[in-house]
Amino acid sequence: MSAIRSIPWTLVISIALTTGIFSQSPPRATNPTNPPRSANPPPRLEAVAETQLLMDGLARPNFGGLRKILSDKPSEIDAWKFARGQALLIAETGNLLMLRPPRGAGQDTWMARSTELREAAYRLARSLAAQDYLRSRAGLVEVANSCNRCHQSFRVPVRVSPLPDAEP
Ligand code: HEC
């Protein structure tokens, strides 16, 4: 008897805890409707470049390239393909713009203008893929309009023109 009494009860309890005797919840593997969550949170999109850099590095050069290629009907298939790529990069710029809306008022307008740019440029990319010159010319005007609509909304004194040899 004295031997049993001398068992340290803290040891018994800690064994019970580690072997799960006191545990009420069923093992996770038997509960497939509630699978264990991944320990890592999903990656978050984060704006890193200035808007001005997106304009100078993506919007302006790709728009200028399209204006040049479409000043005449392209005869080479590679020119159509290249132009399609430029239009898609402008469309993707629309996505990047959505990561950096201005604070406060103007957010909704910014999102709407960015979406317009993405959609107009994506439509243009599809016309270029179809090698449809007239639709592509009209599409370039649509893209220019969406650039200018955002600039007007946010009082940016830059006017984009679809005419060949125009600036910027
Ligand atoms: C969602 C809004 C938005 C859209 C769409 C947009 N821009 Fe801009 N753009 C801006 C803002 C804001 C600035 C001013 C950036 C700054 O100076 O910080 C700017 C500035 C510019 C500048 C001047 C950059 C400089 O160095 O000062 C050019 C060129 C430009 N945009 C071209 C374009 C072209 C081309 C398109 C369309 C293909 C376009 N933008 C579409 C918001 C927009």
Image (cartoon, rainbow, N blue to C red):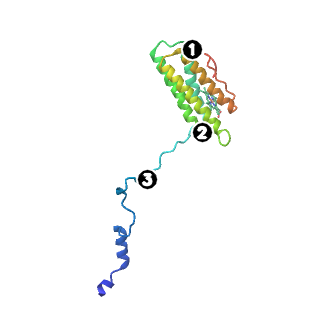
Nearest to the observer: residue 16 or residue 160: 16
Gap in angstroms between the C-alphas marked 3 and 2: 28 Å
**What residue sits 57% from the left and 39% below the top?**
99
- Residue 19 at x, y percent in the picture: 33, 68
Residue at x-position 54% and y-position 18%? 136
Label 2 to label 1: alpha-carbon separation: 33 Å
Residue at 45% over, 17% down: 78
Amino acid on which disc 1 is placed: Ser
Position above or below: 118 against 167: below
Quarter of the rendered structure image containing ligand 1:
top right
**Residue 65: image x %, image y %?**
55, 21
Three-letter amino acid code of the residue under disc 3: Ala
> Which disc is residue 83 wearing?
none
Q: Which amino acid, by three-letter code, is at mark 2?
A: Arg
The residue under label 2 is 100
User: Can residue 57 be seen from the camera position used here?
Assistant: no
Image location of residue 41, percent across then percent down: 47, 49
Residue bearing mark 3: 39
Ligand 1 neighbours mark 3 (CB distance < 8 Å): no
| Quadrant of image for the C terminus | top right
What SS does tag 1 mark?
Answer: loop
Q: Helix or strand or loop: what does disc 2 sit on?
A: loop
- Corner quadrant of residue 120: top right
**Quarter of the image containing the N terminus?**
bottom left
**Label 1, on which residue?**
71
Q: Mark 3 or 2 closer to N-term?
A: 3
Q: Residues within 10 Å of mark 1 (few under 14, many from 20)?
A: some
Marks 2 and 3: in contact by CB < 8 Å? no
